[in-house]
Image (spheres, rainbow, N blue to C red):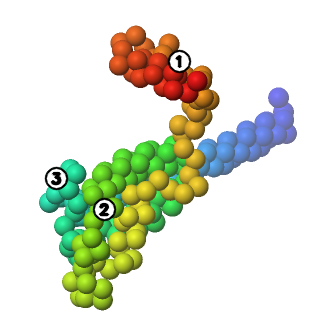
């Protein structure tokens, strides 16, 4: 090969190396960005979970299951703030799988709060304190916590896809091990017809 051909081969090789280096840098940047987003989503998930755990603990740690939380202004305020902190963290989670995991934790803590707040549905208003008293539970805190404990309006129920029409429930749909359930389904069908 003559000198011009070698020069052309060297120039092409250098251009290819530069392109490969550029592509390598682009892919490295993409990988770093993706890993950073994943770390951020995991951090937000952990923060959200911790916020809900702390909200429940702050409000209900002193009570047994089936008992309402203490009528404690500071506990109610702190729990409400932690629930709002949870909502903020959850809203920043962009990864669908991480968000789904977050909502699973939310469902668990919603139920735990519901169980503790349920006795208040038949309670007296005095539980919350004297209106406008410095020791009473602020209405906004009570609303935030009570609303969090309820199934969100407009949220699709994942069980809806299993809805069974009247008369189509059959005890054969339950495993043989669950005899009492099978009997219940049999009674259910008798009442529907």
Residues at marks 1 and 3 touching, judged by CB atoms closer than 8 Å: no
Residue 39: x and y in percent read 44, 51
Residue in front for this viewpoint, 30 or 8 = 30
The nearer-to-camera label among 2 and 3 is: 2
Q: Is residue 148 above or below residue 28?
A: below
Residue at the image position 39 percent from the left and 77 percent from the top: 140
Q: Report whether 160 appears left or right of 139.
A: right
| Tag shown at residue 188 | none
> Quadrant of the rendered structure where residue 131 is?
bottom left
Q: Quadrant of the C terminus?
A: top right
Binning the other alpha carbons within 10 Å of mark 1 as few (below 14), some (14 to 19) or many (20 upward) gives some
Report whether residue 35 is seen. Answer: no
Q: Is residue 37 above or below residue 164?
A: below
Binning the other alpha carbons within 10 Å of mark 3 as few (below 14), some (14 to 19) or many (20 upward) gives few
Q: Quadrant of the N terminus?
A: top right
Residue at the image position 20 percent from the left and 50 percent from the top: 65
Residue in front for this viewpoint, 45 or 18 = 45
Sequence-wise first label, 2 or 3: 3
Residue matched to label 1: 170
Sequence-wise first label, 1 or 3: 3
Residue at the image position 24 percent from the left and 72 percent from the top: 127
Residue matched to label 3: 64
Residue 157: x and y in percent read 54, 44
> Mark 2 falls on what kind of element?
helix
Residue 54: x and y in percent read 26, 60
Residue at the image position 43 percent from the left and 56 percent from the top: 150
Binning the other alpha carbons within 10 Å of mark 2 as few (below 14), some (14 to 19) or many (20 upward) gives few
Sequence-wise first label, 2 or 1: 2
The answer for how far apart the CA atoms under marks 2 and 3 are is 18 Å
Report whether residue 80 is seen. Answer: yes
Residue matched to label 2: 122
> Mark 3 falls on what kind of element?
loop
């Amino acid at each position: 090969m003559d000198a011009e051909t070698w020069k052309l081969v060297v120039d092409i090789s250098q251009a290819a190396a530069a392109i490969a280096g550029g592509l390598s840098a682009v892919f490295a940047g993409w990988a770093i960005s993706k890993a950073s987003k994943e770390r951020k989503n995991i951090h937000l998930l952990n923060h959200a979970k911790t916020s809900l755990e702390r909200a429940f603990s702050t409000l209900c740690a002193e009570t047994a299951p089936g008992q309402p939380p203490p009528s404690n202004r500071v506990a109610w305020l702190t729990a409400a703030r932690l629930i709002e902190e949870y909502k903020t963290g959850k809203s920043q989670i962009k990864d669908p799988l991480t968000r789904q995991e977050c909502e699973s934790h939310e469902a668990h803590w919603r139920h735990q709060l519901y169980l503790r707040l349920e006795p208040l549905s038949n309670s007296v208003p005095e539980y919350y304190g004297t209106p406008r008293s410095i020791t009473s539970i602020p209405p906004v805190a009570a609303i935030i916590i009570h609303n969090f404990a309820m199934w969100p309006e407009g949220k699709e129920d994942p069980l809806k896809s299993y809805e069974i029409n009247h008369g189509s429930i059959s005890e054969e749909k339950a495993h043989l091990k669950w005899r009492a359930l099978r009997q219940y389904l049999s009674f259910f069908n008798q009442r529907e017809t």
